[in-house]
Image (spheres, helix red, strand yellow):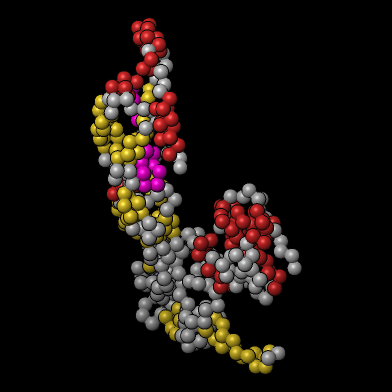
């Protein structure tokens, strides 16, 4: 069977943004979810097809290969994800954390950890929450502790999360005797078969609530807020995410809390430009200072510094102040050294001149020493080129 175009599967254009692709997939996943279409084979196929399309289009590398080579560019190369056999339901459900996280759970099925065919007691998992934090380069250079007041579901203080009123409000589920799953014996073409499924009475929790807590209507969680302290390591960059485990929404019925994801935003420095762990400053020298040399003040991450300018400093020269950049951070959040501050020298040419200045310059114009020196010009160009190589 020929595979359908992935963009067509999700109903998005070839130029769709990552966000549009995510939204389109979420819509399809809800529409064709097996919990909503029990026993519907066609819906299941569509559900898998959408997941496969999303798997490829949500990954910039795979998407680029797909755009260039079509299905041949991603089949088999997906690293055991799919290809001939298609994605397994487990694979698909494992993608859900990413898609539905931070959106307050998901219908009847997103709230459970894992969500796929577990046969042991199930615990509710609270949704992940996202907050944004804006940091200055100074804060990034040292690392910082930030406090957030997060509005979220917290454990119900009245029932301490059980969802039950008073003692003895929770009972072991009589149908599954607390195991969370039931065994069914069915006649099939292979003979009698036993299958384990989630207990329909307790939804896999293994317990049922007799008297519901009046404060939380038996949910075990209420909407409230918590002050959370996030330790942001030095060296983070725009778009990075710091995960604070267990500080998302509380899980229903003393379940597992979700995580709080702190998304880093970077405040632009008025004078310094960040290039990974290096900082760049564009220094404008006057013509006389470039020619005569001197001392100038430049901004640094901690304030100001004075640097010496050699006589005859050329525009395009880059002065490197070692260790005056930002800490380098690896993917595990550990520092791996510090970058440099690069001072890029430019020379300021006045846009208008007084009569005297003009006369002065006209004299220089003829002086032999002011003619561009070819070997020097070459040297400057080499330096300039090395910046880009
Ligand atoms: Zn309660
Ligand atoms: Zn049960």
Looking at the picture, does residue 279 appear above or below residue 87?
Answer: above
Q: Residue at x 67, y 61 (%)?
A: 71
Q: Is residue 22 visible?
A: no
Q: Nearer the viewer, residue 80 or 173?
A: 80
Q: Quadrant of the C terminus?
A: top left
- The extreme right residue here reads 1
Q: Nearer the viewer, residue 351 or 173?
A: 351
Question: In the image, residue 52 lies at what x, y percent?
Answer: 62, 64
Q: Is residue 239 visible?
A: yes
- The extreme front residue here reads 375
The mark tally for this picture is 0
Q: Residue at x 38, y 56 (%)?
A: 330
Image position of 120 (left or right of 299): right
Q: Nearer the viewer, residue 120 or 300?
A: 300
Question: In the image, residue 382 lies at what x, y percent?
Answer: 43, 35
Looking at the picture, does residue 129 appear above or below residue 361?
Answer: below
Image position of 24 (left or right of 96): right
Q: Residue at x 38, y 17 (%)?
A: 370
Question: In the image, residue 301 lies at what x, y percent?
Answer: 30, 41
Question: In the image, residue 28 lies at what x, y percent?
Answer: 63, 61
Residue extent of the magenta highlight: 273-286
Q: Nearer the viewer, residue 231 or 355?
A: 355
Image position of 60 (left or right of 329): right
Q: Main secondary structure of the magenta part?
A: strand
Q: Quadrant of the N terminus?
A: bottom right
Q: Residue at x 40, y 47 (%)?
A: 276
Looking at the picture, does residue 332 appear above or below residue 289?
Answer: below
**Residue 228 shown in magenta:** no
- The extreme bottom residue here reads 191
């Amino acid at each position: 069977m020929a595979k359908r175009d992935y963009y067509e599967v999700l109903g998005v254009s070839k130029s769709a943004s990552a966000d549009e692709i995510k939204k389109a997939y979420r819509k399809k996943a809800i529409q064709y979810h097996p919990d909503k279409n029990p026993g519907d084979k066609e819906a299941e196929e569509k559900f898998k097809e959408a997941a496969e399309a999303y798997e490829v289009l949500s990954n910039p590398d795979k998407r680029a290969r797909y755009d260039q080579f079509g299905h041949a560019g991603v089949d088999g190369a997906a690293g055991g994800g799919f290809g001939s056999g298609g994605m397994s339901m487990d694979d698909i459900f494992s993608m859900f954390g990413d898609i539905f996280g931070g959106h307050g759970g998901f219908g009847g099925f997103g709230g459970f950890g894992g969500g796929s065919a577990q046969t042991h007691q199930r615990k509710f998992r609270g949704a992940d929450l996202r907050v944004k934090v804006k940091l200055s380069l100074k804060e990034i250079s040292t690392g910082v502790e930030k406090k957030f007041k997060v509005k979220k579901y917290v454990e119900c203080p009245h029932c301490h999360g059980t969802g039950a009123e008073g003692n003895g409000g929770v009972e072991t589920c009589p149908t599954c005797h607390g195991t969370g799953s039931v065994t069914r014996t069915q006649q099939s073409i292979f003979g009698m078969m036993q299958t384990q499924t989630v207990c329909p009475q307790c939804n896999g929790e293994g317990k049922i609530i007799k008297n519901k807590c009046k404060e939380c209507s038996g949910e075990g969680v209420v909407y409230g807020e918590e002050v959370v302290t996030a330790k942001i390591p030095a060296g983070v960059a725009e778009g990075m995410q710091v995960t604070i485990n267990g500080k998302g929404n509380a899980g229903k019925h003393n379940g597992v809390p979700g995580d709080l994801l702190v998304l880093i935003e970077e405040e632009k420095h008025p004078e310094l430009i960040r290039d990974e762990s290096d900082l760049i400053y564009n220094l404008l020298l006057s013509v006389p200072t470039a020619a005569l040399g001197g001392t100038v003040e430049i901004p640094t991450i901690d304030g100001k510094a004075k640097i010496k300018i050699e006589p005859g400093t050329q525009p395009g020269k880059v002065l490197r102040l070692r260790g005056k950049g930002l800490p380098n951070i690896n993917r595990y959040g550990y520092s791996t050294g510090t970058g440099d501050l690069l001072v890029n020298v430019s020379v300021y040419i006045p846009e208008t001149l007084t009569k005297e200045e003009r006369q002065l310059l006209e004299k220089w114009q003829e002086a032999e020493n002011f003619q561009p020196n070819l070997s020097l010009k070459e040297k400057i160009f080499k330096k300039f080129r090395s910046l880009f190589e």
